[in-house]
Image (cartoon, helix red, strand yellow):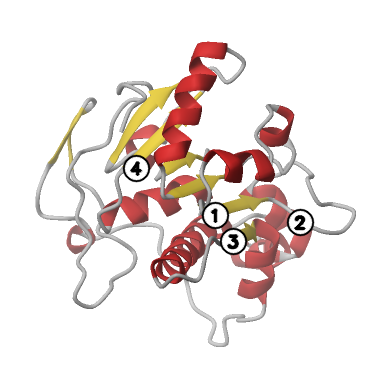
Amino acid sequence: MLDLTRVLAGPVATRTLAGFGADVLRIDPPGWDEANVVPEITLGKRCAMLDLTDAADRDTFERLLAEADLLVHGYRPDALANLGYDTQARQALKPGLVEVTLDAYGWTGPWAGRRGFDSLVQMSCGIADAGMGWAGAEKPTPLPVQALDHATGYLMAAAALRLLHRAAAGEGAGRARLSLARTAELLCAHRQEVPGRLSLSHAAEDRQAAEEATPWGPARRLKPAITVAGAPMAWDRPAQRLGSSDPAW
């Protein structure tokens, strides 16, 4: 799986798929960093860097794409096209390529392609209004967790598995397009019926028993938020620094 995602929904999706056995190669531009979240979102992945404005790096990227089974990307809709990798070009490089992608505000309508992230979408869709009541604040307040990012990430992982299953059954290539705004619509349609409090603390049983040896030192990671009967999640490599691996399968 070729991972062209950034904070936070896309990396949650690719981290989840890595936990179910996917060989994930994340690609970032030289010098890119995501301070404070890299130890969280690179679990199970190898992380390389390529400059897609450089001819040699473009050749490398195209070889990687030609050998990938799945491409997950979270750039704005025109970003890859502006680099010469629109949908037709990607399918020409790898016929039958399965793709899962996301944006902030959806793929149609006046806000399609608009930049955005979780907290902004919460402000736009009314979740921050509900958060204002939860926080006892006098102004709209996003939730104290990136709920849209995490929920969209798990939906992306589920979409990828469904598409790969269809491809294995001979039903051809497929593409899934998700957005934070659509996930917000889904969550708003399932409002909390019984008032309650959201705990911001964690208990010892929330953490996995084994220590993870990371480049930042030993760590105890929280247990996965999802379970699948008969397919326990497991990662064969700890979190990595961005750019720590070669761009190769």
Q: Are marks 4 and 3 in contact (CB under 8 Å)?
A: no
Q: Nearer the viewer, residue 14 or 163?
A: 163
The Cα atoms of the two marked residues, 4 and 3, are separated by 18 Å
Q: Amino acid at mark 4?
A: Val
Q: Which mark is residue 176?
A: 3
Q: Secondary structure at mark 3?
A: strand
Label 1: which residue? 100
- Residue 24 is marked as 4
- The CA span between labels 1 and 2 is 13 Å
Query: Which residue is the extreme one toward the right?
Result: 110
> Where, by quadrant of the figure, is residue 205 drawn?
bottom left
Locate the N terminus by quadrant. Answer: top left
- Which quadrant of the structure image shows residue 232? bottom left
**Looking at this view, is 118 or 9 the one in front?**
9
Residue that protrudes farthest toward the bottom in the picture: 193
Count the marks: how many?
A: 4
Please tell me how crowded label 3 is: few (under 14), some (14-19), or many (20+) other residues with Cα within 10 Å. some
Mark 4 and mark 2 lie on one chain; the one further toward the N terminus is 4
